Amino acid sequence: MSSQPLSKTACPLPPLGMDALSLRMDTCHYLLRTLGAEETAEPANSVYTALAMSLRDRLVERWKNTQKKVAAESGRRTFYLSLEFLLGRAMGNALLNLGLEDAAREALTREHRELVDIMELEPDAGLGNGGLGRLAACFLDSCASLGLPVTGYGIRYSYGMFRQEIRGGEQVEEPDHWLRNGCPWELKRPERVRRVHFFGRSDGYHDAQGRFHQRWVDTHDVLAVPYDIPIPGYRNEVVNTLRLWRATATDIFDLGEFNAGAYPEAVAAKNNAEHISMVLYPNDSSENGKELRLRQQYFLASASLQDVVADWVAIHGEDFRNFAKHHCFQLNDTHPSCAVPELMRLLMDEHGLNWEEAWDITSHTMAYTNHTLLPEALERWSVRLFRQLLPRLLEIIMEINARFLQEVAWRAPGNTGLLQRLSIIEEGDEQMVRMAHLAVVGSFSVNGVAALHTRLLCEDLFADFHHLWPKKFNNKTNGVTPRRWLQWANPGLRDLVTERIGPDWKHDLERLRDLEPAADDAKFRKRWAEVRRANKERLAALVHQHTGVTFIRDALVDVQVKRIHEYKRQLLNALHVIHLYDRIKRGEANQVTPRNVLFAGKAAPGYFMAKRTIKFINNIANVINHDPDTEGLLRVSFLPDYRVSLMEQICAATDLSEQISTAGKEASGTGNMKFMMNGALTIGTLDGANIEIRDAVGAEHFFLFGLNAEEVSQLRGHYNPELYIQADHDLARVMDLLQSGYFNAFEPGIFDPIVHAVTHPHDPWMVLADFTSYKIKQREAADVWHDQTEWQRLSILNTAASGIFSSDRTIAQYNTDIWHLTPLVMTP
Ligand code: 26W
C-alpha cells in the first residue's frame, strides 16, 4: 500500500459519464443515499438537489483540472472584485455549458419528472441590484468560455435582492432567504479562512534593523470564510471560480465578555460580525453612506487581497518583484476600491516593502471600471467614519493623496483650484474621501462602459484626470452572454438560427450576420414569427398567472423592464400609455394599434419617487384594463419581482424594447442588448449603448427620438415644461386627465408629486421635453407593426446585427487592452 495521502496519488476515479444513464444513476444515488428520499414519493425539491449534485460532480472534475493547469502554467491572472454578482439560476447554465441538456431531460423523464419543472424550483441567486451585478455574472461566463484565468471575488449575502410584492398597487419588500434550502452549487473552504481587521489604531515602531514601520493594533477582527461557486465555460472543459466570502466571529464567544458574565454581549459580538455578510444593499445609483456598507466593502477587499497574496507567498516567499506581472485586479465600480490602500497596507505592514515598492505594485495591478455619471451615485465616505473604522487605511489614503497632489503641484504650479478638484479628500463642513478619485489615482486603467459614457467621463466627470493621464482612459462597451440570453432563453430561435446558418455562431456571435439574407426569405420570416409567437404565449401565461391581466393575442408586446429610476423615465412611458388610452376614449379606437404594455422592476426601498411611479403604473393599468372600451386594444401590466429568471422569459417574447433614458444618463444599459439579440426592435434615445445598437443595425431600423446629450445639457437652466404642454395638444390632454384625478379617484392627491416633478422647470430628466417626439416614434413603430412582413424582417436584422454585444467581445477587449492573459486550452 502506498503511504501517500489519497489526494497526492493519481486520481483513481474514472471520469464521470456524460450520458443520460450516468446522470440518472448519480441522481438516484444522491436522492436515495445522500438525501434519504423515499423511493415512492421523493419531493421535487430533492430531485432538484440530487440533479444539481450530480452536475456539480461533473463541474468539480473539470474545476480540479483547470486549477492544475492554471498552477502549472503560472501565468498572469485577473481577479474581478465586485460587491455584486447577479447570477440567477445555475442549473440551466451548467446543463448548457456542459452539453448535458438532453441527457438531463431524458434522465428525468425516466423518473416521470419534467426538467423545466425541476429547474423552476431553483431560487435565483440575486446577489446584485441590476446592470452592474448582472454584467459581472455575464463577464464570468465569458471569461470561462474564452478560457481566461479569471477569478471572481464577492460577498455571500445571506439575503440577496429583496423579493418584491405588489399590494394595493404598491411595492412591498420581503426578505430573500435564498439559502433556506442550502445551495448545492457552492463548496465551503474553511481551510482558507482569512482574518479582517476593524477599528483599533495605527502604531509606529522600529524593527530589529532599525527600520520604521506602522502596524494596525488593538483591532476587532472578523473572519472571512470562502464559499466557491464553479463557473463553467461553454463546452471547453474550463471551470473558473467565483469565491464568495461569509463573515463570522473570530471566536464563538468573546471569552473576556463571557468570563465577566456578559453572555448576551458575547453572543451579540458574534452576531455583529455576521451582519457584514447578512444583506445586499438594495440601492442602485444612490449612495447612502451607511457604516455597514463600508464594512462590507473593506471586508471584500481585504479578504480577497489576503487570499491572493497568501497564494503568492506560498510559492515565491517574500519576493514580490514579479507580483505585478502576474496579477490584475479589476474593480467593478468604486465599491471595492478600498483594495488600493489595502494592497499598500499588506505589502508594507505585513510584508515589509517600502512605500515606493508597494506603490509600484499597487498602481500597476489595479484597474477601475466606472458604471455611472450620476453625482448621487458617486461614493464618498466621511473621513471621520474612515478614521474610526479603518484608521490604518485612512493614514495610507492620506499619504497617497499627499504624494499625488505633490506631483500635480509640480506639473501645474500655483493651480490651487486644480488641486482641490483632483484631491482624493473633499474639503467642506465634513471632510470626505472621494472613492472615485482614489480608484483613478490607484489604477493603471480606467474605463467606461459605452462609447458615449467614456467620452463623458473624459470630458466631464474625470476631465482633470484625463488631462493629466490621457492614456489611462479607455472604453469597453458592455456586452451580455449569448449562452444565457439567446441559447438558453430562446431555444426555439437558437435552433432556427442554427438550421439556417449552421452552428458556428455559438462560438463567434458575429457570425449572426450570416442571417441577413434570411430577412428577405418569406418562409424563414414565417418560422421566425412562429417561434416568437410561441414565446409570447408563454409570457402571456406568466403575466396572467402573476397579475391576472390577459394579454391581447397577436398584439405588439411593448416592454420596459429595469430598475425603477427617474432617469430611466418609466414616467414617460406611462404618460404615453395614458395618451393611447385617451385616443381610444376620444374615438380613435380604429387608429390605435393593439398593444400589451409590460413594466417590471424594483424601486430602492427609500426612493419615494420610484415607489410612487410603481403605484402610478399600477393605477393606470387598473383603470385601462377594466374599461370595456380598451378591449382588444390596450392592456397594461406590472409584473412583480423582476429578476434574472423572469428576464429569460421576457426577452424572448418582446417586440418593442423601451430604452428611453434622458440622454447622457444611462452609462450603457445591457437589457437593451438582450432584447436586440432576441429580435426585438428598439425605441430609444441617443444614450449609452443605444447609440452603438443603432449604428450596428442601421439608423433606419431603430426608432430614435428625443434630445441628445448635448441638447439636454444646453437646455438645462432654460427648460420650461409648460411650453411643451402648450405645444402638444395630446400632452395637454394627458396632463389634464392626470390632474383631474382620473387614475386616483379614491386616493386624492397621491399623484401630485408626479405632476409636480414633470412640470417643474428643474426636472433634471426633462420628461416632457421628449414626449412629442416619443409619441411620434411610437406611432411610427405601430405603423410598421401593421406591416408584419416588414416587422419580421427588421426583427431578423436586429438579431443578425447583435453579435458585437456578446460579452465575449467585451472580455476579449478587456484582455487585449488591460489584462493580457493567455487563454487556457483544456483537453477533454
Ligand atoms: C453605492 C450605490 C450604488 C450602487 C450601484 C451606486 C451605483 C451603483 C451602480 C453603478 C448602478 C448600476 O448598476 N449601473 C449600471 O451599470 C450597468 C453595467 O455597466 C450599465 O449598463 C448601466 O447603464 C448602469 O446604470
Image: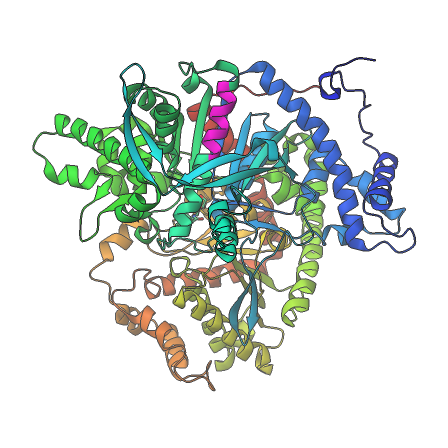
The residue closer to the viewer here, 308 or 727, is: 308
- Residue at 32 percent across and 54 percent down: it is 376
Indicate whether residue 223 is drawn in magenta: no
Q: Give the range drawn in magenta.
A: 303-313
The mark tally for this picture is 0
**Furthest-left residue in view?**
414
- Name the side, left or right, on which 482 lies relative to 745: right
- Name the side, left or right, on which 657 lies relative to 48: left
Q: Tell me: residue 7, above or below residue 152.
A: above
- Name the side, left or right, on which 17 lies relative to 260: right
Q: Where is residue 356 in the image (x, y as percent from the top left)?
A: 28, 20
Dividing the picture into quadrants, the one containing residue 435 is top left
Dividing the picture into quadrants, the one containing residue 633 is bottom right
Q: Is residue 666 visible to the viewer in this orientation of the structure?
A: no
- Residue at 50 percent across and 56 percent down: it is 562
Q: Tell me: residue 14, above or below residue 130.
A: above
Q: In which quarter of the image is the N terminus?
A: top right
Q: Is residue 634 visible to the viewer in this orientation of the structure?
A: yes
